[in-house]
């Protein structure tokens, strides 16, 4: 799977989960939405970080900082 499509899927998952926070009122569904937002956010960070390292390998210390 390409990084671009994985990034898009993760962002879409976070948007759906954020909409779910406004729609659902029972605790298990709210907890599931919060978990999906956290999971999507961790995916977005890793994709952006890996793309930054691939685009500038000579500046890996600055990118990781």
Image: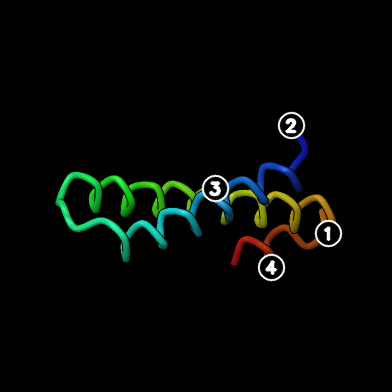
Marks 3 and 2 close (CB-CB < 8 Å): no
- Labels 3, 4: front one: 3
Nearest to N terminus: mark 1 or mark 2: 2
For the C terminus, which image quadrant?
bottom right
Q: CA distance from mark 3 to mark 2?
A: 13 Å
| Circle 4 residue | 62
Q: Which mark is residue 1?
A: 2
Nearest to N terminus: mark 1 or mark 3: 3
Q: CA distance from mark 3 to mark 4?
A: 21 Å
Determine whether the residue tagged by mark 3 lies in a helix, strand or loop: helix
In depth, the one of 9 and 42 nearer the eye is: 9
| Circle 1 residue | 56
- Labels 2, 4: front one: 2
Marks 3 and 4 close (CB-CB < 8 Å): no
Nearest to N terminus: mark 3 or mark 2: 2
Q: Which mark is residue 43?
A: 3
Nearest to N terminus: mark 3 or mark 4: 3
Rendered image coloring scheme: rainbow
From this view, report whether residue 10 is shown above or below residue 52. above
Determine whether the residue tagged by mark 4 lies in a helix, strand or loop: helix
- Labels 1, 3: front one: 3
Q: Position of residue 55 (x, y in %)?
A: 84, 56
Determine whether the residue tagged by mark 2 lies in a helix, strand or loop: loop
């Amino acid at each position: 799977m390409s990084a671009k499509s994985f990034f898009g899927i993760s962002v879409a998952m976070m948007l759906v989960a954020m909409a779910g926070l406004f729609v659902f009122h029972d605790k298990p569904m709210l907890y599931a939405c919060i978990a999906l937002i956290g999971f999507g956010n961790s995916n977005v960070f890793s994709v952006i970080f890996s793309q930054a390292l691939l685009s500038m390998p000579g500046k890996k210390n600055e990118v990781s900082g």
